[in-house]
Amino acid sequence: MFSHHRIACQLGLTASLLALSAPPALAAPRLDPMFGDHAVIQRDHPVTVTGRADSGETVTVTLAGQVRQVRADKEGRFEARFEPLATAGPVLLEAQAPSGNIVAQDVAVGDVFLCSGQSNMELEVRNAQDAVGQIRASADDQLRLMLVPRAVADDPLRDFKQAPSWRRAGPDSVPDFSATCYYMARELRKTAGVPIGAIASSWGGSRISPWMGARAQAAVGQSAQSALVSLHGRDPFAAERAANAEWEKWWRRETGDAFGKEPWQPDSDIAWQDVPRIGPWEEWGLPALADYNGMVWFRREIDLTAAQAKQAATLSLGLLDDVGRVWINGKPVAMSARSWQPSMFDVPPGVLKPGRNVLIVTVQDNYANGGLSGPADVMKLALGQSGELPLGGGWRYAVAARSPAGAPRVPWGDTTGSGTLYNGMIAPLGAIGLKGVAWYQGESDVDLPGYADRMKAMMTDWRRQFGSPDLPFVAVQLAAYGPPVTAPGESGWAAMRHVQYQAMARDAHGGLATAIDLGDPFDIHPGEKQEVGRRLARAMRAVAYGDSVSRTGPQAARAVAMKDGGIAIEFTASPAVCTRAVRIRLLPLNCAATRREAAVSFPAGRKEIACCWLATAVRRYGYAMPGRSRRSSTFMTRRPCRSAPSNCRSYRHTDGRGEGQRRSAASPQVTGTALPVTPSARATSSRIATPFTGADMA
């Protein structure tokens, strides 16, 4: 539907009909949200001011003394292009047209940063540590914040579904803003010396794929998924049929079920049992389902009259936790596409019939509670003029005999879709200038291959949109999570950290902020976000401002075997962290007796050779023991072999200036290319003279 301003009734019915078929008439030009009150415009970057006016109307836009005259297109959109603004500070931004004029208040030229990712980027200041004190002291009229509302779209949007706005940092705006983004921007304000704008656009639980536009999807071989999303925008029923055909094909391939004998058929041979009540199956009081993660089938019969069966129908089933797929009479209806939200499906024409109808639902639970979670009173079949049929009771269930992994998901979903969050939350930003992008995401992509390629494709596409082929990106490595471990082993989280490092180290304009020591074994959303922000700011200073600090931290150069079975890893120098190459001395496995557990493993089954987490950095010629001198360089490796290494402490650097009392943003990185382990002159065993990859410490 169109939104219309009221027009005088004297214009008559004809004018009203014309208004319905044309873009809405505006009382005055309107600037897009990125150029509204309190906006920050990126300095030293071409500026394209965008907005809306009456169709065909001439608009005169003034920015910092530059004047452009443009004409609104048939949809009422206008664009005015300006030369880069080199001087930071307040500027005048105004748009004038015959229909009126608008002046954006308190606009400043400075540096703009975009922050995106999943829940650890989305986590608000009010839910992070020390929220009360930080919010109380947050007032800064030269720090402006924009929070982009959640939105999903099948095609790239030019306008936000719900317009965001710029707000000055302060106790009224900071509490609901991204903690990580705010603390990074606050740190950068201290050194940049210009107004800072921070835009937060995140969605908890999201994979990287929803943040990748169609070009990025094509770069990683996912053009078909993007095309299906676009089809869903034009013809939802056709898209559902195509997606369901792929799912059913996958099911038969994985289970061996013959065509027509699948569990979703009305007369399938399954031992059904009565559902105790609507709600998570973990709460049914059945021991077999108390901790069950997997697939469960549900069935309910519905009797319809001929008149009811002819009606356009909408099926509401409440929350299908985690994800559900629906059939009626063996014909596909839809798959839930919105994570942790009540489901509502339009029933395709011709699916319902007079008499007995069989509704089949499969629910796949991967985490915590799962099932037909209801509530029961929202479960119904709406039949247009024929009213509603309640569906809160009469269900039966059967635990799936097989729950194959890797079920296809509809690509128009929110957190697992293909480009859906890019379309709704990034594309509407248009071609604004940015100083850098902070990215905190990866938990939802653990164990999904190809992350480095997806990250590269996304960065390339965002750089294209924002008109900056060298736009800096800084990513946060995953924080520690889960029960502490004391032995080397495989870990998807560790592998993801390694991939994150590789993706950013290989990008000339990429940076990395490590957060493993800031994790919480019991909370996937650790509250320590101030330090994450400081580390992001440090890396951003390297890649966005050219400061002589490390963008990823000191890098491992080679490893030397020691006679006691330990290993010394030599790191390159890192400006502002250490001025000379250092060695990290990793003690042998027997030091686990001191509760400093093993952390390093070796390839080709050599994991019995492990070393301690606590390590002492050494100068090139000799060891500097912790505590012996205020001028010693003491380091602690923070590259785990597991998702939550035991006794993982902060990396510190003591240089005689008291810096040892702070956590550092730049940590030793022992990931990447294989390091040849050179036997030292004192080594007595050749069994550890083997290449060391460092991958288990990623």
Image (cartoon, helix red, strand yellow):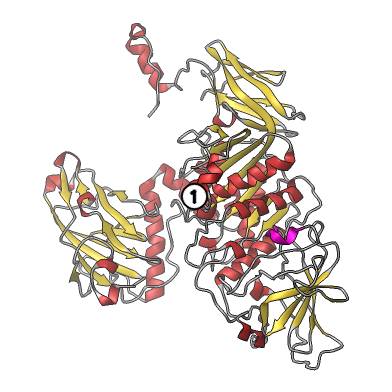
Expressed as whole percent of the image width and height from the top left, the position of residue 258 reads 32, 74
Question: Where residue 35 appears, x then y in whole percent?
Answer: 59, 28
Residue behind mark 1: 203
Left/right of residue 355 with respect to residue 569 in the rendered view: left
User: Can residue 506 be seen at all in this image of the molecule?
Assistant: no
Going 18% across and 54% down the picture, which residue do you hit? 391
- Which residue sits at x=53%, y=40%? 136
Residue type beneath disc 1 = Trp
Q: Quadrant of the N terminus?
A: top left
Q: In the displayed image of the protein, which residue is found farthest to the top?
A: 10
Q: Position of residue 126 (x, y in %)?
A: 48, 46
Q: Is residue 242 visible?
A: yes
Magenta segment boundaries in residue numbering: 658-665
Residue 454: x, y in percent?
61, 58
Instruction: State the image quarter where residue 323 is shown.
Output: bottom left
Q: Is residue 289 above or below residue 118?
A: below
Q: Main secondary structure of the magenta part?
A: loop
Q: Is residue 696 magenta?
A: no
> Which residue is pictured at 40% across the width and 17% down the height?
18
Q: Residues within 10 Å of mark 1 (few under 14, many from 20)?
A: many
Quadrant containing the C terminus is bottom right
Residue 695, placed above or below residue 523: below
In the figure, is residue 63 to the left or right of 158?
A: right
